[in-house]
């Protein structure tokens, strides 16, 4: 699971960061999501159809099985990220909410936040002591760095004080310092109508887009500047000046419940740009419903989703499909591929963070990749594998298809092995790895 998706693009890959929803139990019974997590999940893609699971970044204390990066923080929610070249080096910044009481930041030298990772200030970047920041819910950072103007902007805040449903005055926007771990000036209220939570920032052309989730108190027929909206829709405002003058422009994404994607609930998103097109990242509860959680009604465990957005004359809109999006590139099997890269899977898990390993494998589990382009027929498959007692990985182009190779997995620690390719692999195809035994671990593969 994963909620509240944030993002950055680096070196041709889209990195997505989510709140790490995980099943909670009381008296051996699954209970409704209690939002208790110190992990931030990280996944990435170069083509939007095959995704690499980089594991959970141990940001805060709650339910984290290792030393947290930000030892002062209890939870890590609603992340967003950015990168910037500072003193000739690419630096990465992951912003997160510590419950609803402050916003923190960690830094690293890589987008999976495993290299030279630091808690640079040892406390909140935005706290209730920050000028003009004593909002009801001090959380949900939305960050965007514009390299053309060397400007980084953060939006944050939420909550609905009694009697202030229409003008909550709980949203804030502020410029980040050149170091990305401080702020410039005083945060201001952009006048967000019917704000609930959930901030996203992006610059498109010369215009800044600030989007957010409307609250649940919107009256029927409500509109602003002639643009209608409803409860819990994602609305947006624009300005050519990131530090003022925002005007409401309408709804970019309606609530998942009103779209029939799930039974409704909080709506959290990011508007993103990747390889020349715009998309909306959001979460829904469709996966838990399909899994039959609580008889199919769900318990508010959320999963990240993506759909393509339409940008026309400055207006941006998107509808949720739960079908995913089209590939924007092919996968090259002659380059090293991490085994935790997949389009779909059955039964497997991953361990670690950053460079993870496929683990918790049982007999019959599988991994699928799609849009794999074989420009020429390979002869050899090299893989890094290990197991408790040995096994075989069947490689094929259909789940019930004939094998094109068998990877013999030795007992013991992960090591590099070679397999002969004896089947026909040409053109662009799906690729399956099917496990014959329990206890196999799978790190990477590459054809030649």
Image (cartoon, rainbow, N blue to C red):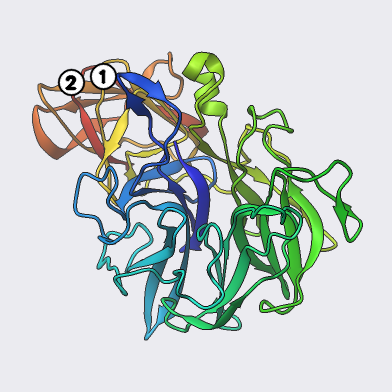
Residue 267's x, y, as percent? 62, 43
Q: Nearer the viewer, mark 2 or mark 1?
A: 1
Rendered-image quadrant of the C terminus: top left
Identify the mark nearer the N-term, 2 or 1: 1
- Residue in the picture at 61% in, 59% down: 200
> Callout 1: 10 Å neighbours few (<14), some, many (20+)?
some
Rendered image: mark on residue 142? none
Distance CA(mark 2)–CA(mark 1): 11 Å
- Residue in the picture at 45% in, 70% down: 126
> What secondary structure is marked by label 2?
strand
User: According to the image, label 1 marks what residue?
Assistant: 362
- Residue in the picture at 36% in, 23% down: 366
**Camera-nearest residue between 385 and 296:** 296
**Camera-nearest residue between 279 and 343:** 279
Residue 189's x, y, as percent? 66, 71
> What secondary structure is marked by label 1?
loop
- Residue in the picture at 48% in, 30% down: 430
The answer to which image quadrant residue 261 occupies is top right
Up/down of 303 relative to 225, above or below: above
Res. 248 in view: yes
**Camera-nearest residue between 440 and 430:** 440
Up/down of 79 relative to 85, above or below: above
Residue lying furthest front:
163
User: According to the image, label 2 marks what residue?
Assistant: 391
The answer to which image quadrant residue 270 occupies is bottom right
């Amino acid at each position: 699971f994963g909620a509240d998706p944030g993002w950055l693009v680096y070196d041709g890959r889209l990195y997505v960061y989510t709140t790490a929803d995980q099943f909670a139990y009381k008296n051996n019974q699954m209970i409704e999501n209690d939002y208790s997590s110190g992990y931030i999940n990280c996944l990435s893609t170069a083509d939007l159809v095959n995704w690499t699971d980089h594991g959970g970044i141990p940001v805060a204390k709650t339910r984290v099985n290792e030393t947290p990066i930000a030892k002062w923080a209890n939870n890590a929610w609603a992340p967003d990220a950015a990168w910037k070249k500072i003193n000739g080096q690419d630096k990465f910044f992951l912003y997160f909410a510590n419950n609803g009481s402050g916003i923190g930041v960690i830094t690293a030298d890589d987008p999976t936040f495993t290299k030279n990772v630091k808690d640079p200030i040892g406390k909140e970047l935005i706290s209730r002591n920050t000028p003009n920041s004593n909002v009801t819910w001090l959380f949900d950072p939305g960050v965007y760095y514009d390299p053309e103007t060397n400007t980084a902007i953060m939006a944050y805040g939420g909550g609905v004080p009694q009697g202030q449903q229409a003008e909550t005055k709980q949203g804030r926007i502020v410029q980040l310092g050149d170091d990305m771990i401080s702020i410039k000036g005083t945060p201001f209220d952009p006048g967000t109508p019917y704000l609930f939570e959930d901030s996203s920032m992006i610059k498109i052309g010369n215009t800044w887009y600030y989007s957010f989730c409307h609250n649940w108190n919107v009256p029927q027929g409500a509109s602003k500047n002639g643009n209608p909206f409803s409860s819990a829709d994602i609305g947006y405002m624009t300005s050519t000046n990131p530090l003022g003058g925002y005007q409401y422009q309408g709804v970019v994404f309606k609530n998942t419940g009103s779209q029939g994607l799930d039974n409704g609930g909080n709506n959290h998103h990011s508007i993103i740009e990747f390889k020349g097109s715009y998309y909306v990242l959001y979460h829904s509860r469709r996966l838990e419903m399909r899994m039959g959680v609580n008889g199919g009604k769900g318990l508010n465990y959320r999963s990240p989703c993506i759909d393509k957005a339409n940008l026309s004359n400055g207006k941006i809109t998107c509808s949720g499909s739960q079908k995913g999006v089209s590939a924007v590139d092919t996968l090259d099997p002659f380059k090293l591929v991490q085994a935790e890269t997949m389009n779909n899977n059955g039964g497997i898990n991953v361990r670690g963070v950053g460079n993870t390993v496929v683990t918790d494998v049982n007999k019959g589990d599988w991994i699928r990749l799609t849009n794999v382009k074989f420009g020429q027929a390979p002869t050899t498959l090299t893989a890094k594998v290990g197991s408790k007692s040995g096994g075989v990985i069947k490689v094929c182009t259909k789940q019930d298809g004939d094998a094109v190779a068998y990877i013999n997995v030795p007992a013991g620690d992960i090591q590099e092995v070679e397999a002969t390719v004896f089947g026909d692999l040409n053109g662009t195809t799906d690729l399956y790895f099917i496990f014959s035994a329990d206890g196999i671990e799978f790190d990477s593969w590459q054809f030649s």
